[in-house]
Amino acid sequence: MNSIQLLHTLPNVFSERTGLQSDVWQQTVRLEKGKVYLVEANSGTGKSSLCSFVYGYRTDYSGDILFDDENIRNFSVKRWIDIRQNHLSLLWQELRLFPELTSMENVLIKNRLTDFQERQQIDYWFDCLGIADKKDSLIGRMSFGQQQRVAMIRALCQPFDFIFIDEPISHLDDTNSQIMADILMDEVRRQGAAVITTSIGKHLPLQYDKILRL
């Protein structure tokens, strides 16, 4: 997948709003593979909705979203399975980890489905992010910042052309934010992928090709 286009897309809940000023909503936006994008937003302007729309998780919007000029509203369940396994990764703002599993189990449950990353690579990321001693800790007993790091590792355990990252460092210090950014970009460059990260203030320290105001 080489491009994602939003054509006059707007969440249905915003349909009655007037004077909407946005670089994304009700605009023509093209996201290209290999680029790095930042979507800046105020709370309540639909950044998590944007991720859900592109991921096919929600369809309560007007306008169109195209993957390589194909309207995603026409995709079958089988097509979505392939896209989510091989072309599109998403780190949810609320993380969606399994609290009854350990941090490593949360990562491996995905990596066993994709068989994409070597265990040595996963262990290395845990070590770099300062959570090597938390591999066997239940996610539900870890801090939110630690959980964010686990969720990032899990998001990288698959092939992708585009990776959407929704508020990934809200609970991280600057040092861990930079480490996460470096890990992300190493993998993104290896796959030749695009990054779309959202922020309501604090954002990943990346070299952005384009900044969009939601």
Image: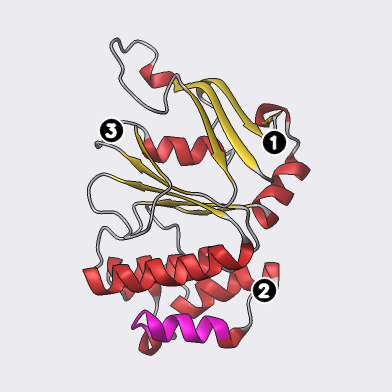
Which residue is painted at 41% across and 71% down in the image?
182
Which tag, 3 or 1, sits closer to the chain's start? 3
Span highlighted in magenta in the image:
121-131
Question: How far from the left and from the top, in percent, is residue 55?
Answer: 57, 42
Q: Secondary structure at mark 1?
A: loop
- Residue drawn at the location 34% of the way across and 52% of the way down: 167
Q: Main secondary structure of the magenta part?
A: helix
Q: Identify residue type, mark 2.
A: Arg
Residue drawn at (37%, 53%) of the image: 94
Dot 3 crowding, Cα within 10 Å, few <14, some 14–19, many 20+: few
In front: label 1 or label 2: 1
Depth order, front residue of 189/140: 189
Q: Earlier in the sequence, mark 1 or mark 2?
A: 1
SS type, badge 3: loop
**Real-space Cα distance between discs 1 and 2?**
29 Å
Q: Does the image show residue 97?
A: yes
Residue 100 shown in magenta? no
Q: Mark 2 packing: few (<14 Cα in 10 Å), some, or many (20+)? A: few
Residue ID for mark 1: 68
Q: Is residue 43 left or right of residue 163?
A: left
Q: Is residue 10 left or right of residue 169?
A: right
**In the rendered image, which residue does mark 2 sit on?**
112
Circle number at residue 44 = 3
Residue 140 seen in render: no
Which quarter of the rendered picture does the C terminus lie within? top left
